[in-house]
Image (tube, grey):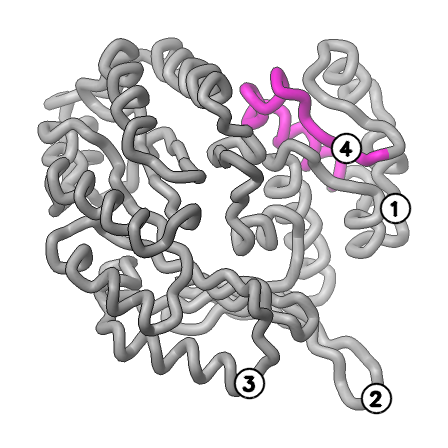
Amino acid sequence: MCIGHIVRGGVVIVISTNILRTPSLAEPETIYSVINTVKEMVKFSNQGEVTLEVNPTILEKAHLRDFKSAGINRVSVGVQTLDSNALAVLGRDHTVKSALECVHDARVLFPGSVSVDLIFGFPGHSLSAWKRELQQLLQICDKHISLYQLTLERGTQLFKMIEKGLTKLPPEDEIVDMYKTAVQVLKENGFERYEVSNFAKEVRYSTHNLAYWEGKQYIGVGPGAHGRFVVQSNDGSLERHARIQTLEPDNWMWEIESLEELLALGMRICWGISHQRWNQRCPQLSLYDIFNSDIVSTYCSANLLKLDNRGLRATPEGMDVLDSIIPDLILLLHQALAR
């Protein structure tokens, strides 16, 4: 569950229940208790975004109205795919029918505030099937869509099957075509690609995700939740915190990881990283100091990047191949910090 638009310091609060990594498996009463505890501690904006990730099983679908009463005002529905066979391959415990019904019911309860998650590039997936799936999705989706290429997780049944050669992923060039096709189809239907994997209609961006991508503060609460925030002490001094599942890094490593995170996530949004945002995190080195290099000039000449008075950002063409550009940018960052 993600709670956005907390007024005090503009901090986002991320609640992790760690219940099979699906917060909506928690009882609505538990969600209500968490939200109200947060509201007692901070001033909560009337426009605050409170998002719950929902797995579209029959049980969780039945709880949607209760979740709204608990204080949820935006839901992200993990549809994943509209292919029944693929749902089984991916190990999902919902059906296409329950997914479609969940999206419909969510739109009734949370009009304009429903996001749909889809996965592409799984075993047996084809470009033609993907095109049909996108057209079907557009008939039932709301104002926000997230598309993710399948990521194999070691230890899962699917990972073992592929490792043993029992099944295989589509060719890499076809997966690339799937992504490009989705970008074009969604654009034609009024969706803006405001982040590499996220598309919104009528500027219905995900507020809490923007906080991560733009390098803003966020507090992680619960098992497995990650947070990064700055606390101002009574004497006015700043105390940095990073909440992760390992020992906390020292100040230098905190700075490096913080800047890497800002770079890797900030470049994923269409407006990139502004000079103001970067200087807030790294006043000693400007974007020009770090990225005024031959390799960035080459990317700019190829119309993949832009570095100007607005900041550093990827072009639409650059967003298509951003994963191959980010490592070069991080290397330049390390070189500049080591000088």
Q: Which callout, 4 or 3, points at the residue further toward the start of the chain? A: 3
**Dominant secondary structure of the residues highlighted in magenta in the image:** helix
- Circle 2 packing at 10 Å, graded few (<14), some (14-19), many (20+), is few
Q: Provide residue 119's location: percent of width, then percent of height.
A: 31, 32
Q: Provide residue 23's location: percent of width, then percent of height.
A: 30, 63
Magenta-tinted stretch: 310-333
Q: Which callout, 3 or 2, points at the residue further toward the start of the chain? A: 3
Q: Secondary structure under badge 2?
A: loop
Residue identifier under label 3:
41
Residue identifier under label 4:
312
- Circle 3 packing at 10 Å, graded few (<14), some (14-19), many (20+), is few
Residue identifier under label 2:
235
Q: Does the magenta stretch include residue 138?
A: no
Residue 144 in the figure: left or right of residue 42: left
Three-letter code, disc 3: Met
Q: Does the magenta stretch include residue 331?
A: yes
**Distance (Cα) linking label 2 and label 4:** 35 Å
Foreground: disc 1 or disc 3:
3
**Distance (Cα) linking label 4 and label 1:** 14 Å
The residue that appears at 45% across and 84% down in the rendered structure is: 37
Q: Which callout, 2 or 4, points at the residue further toward the start of the chain? A: 2
Asked if residue 245 shows in the view, the reply is no
What numbered label is drawn on residue 285?
1
Three-letter code, disc 2: Asp
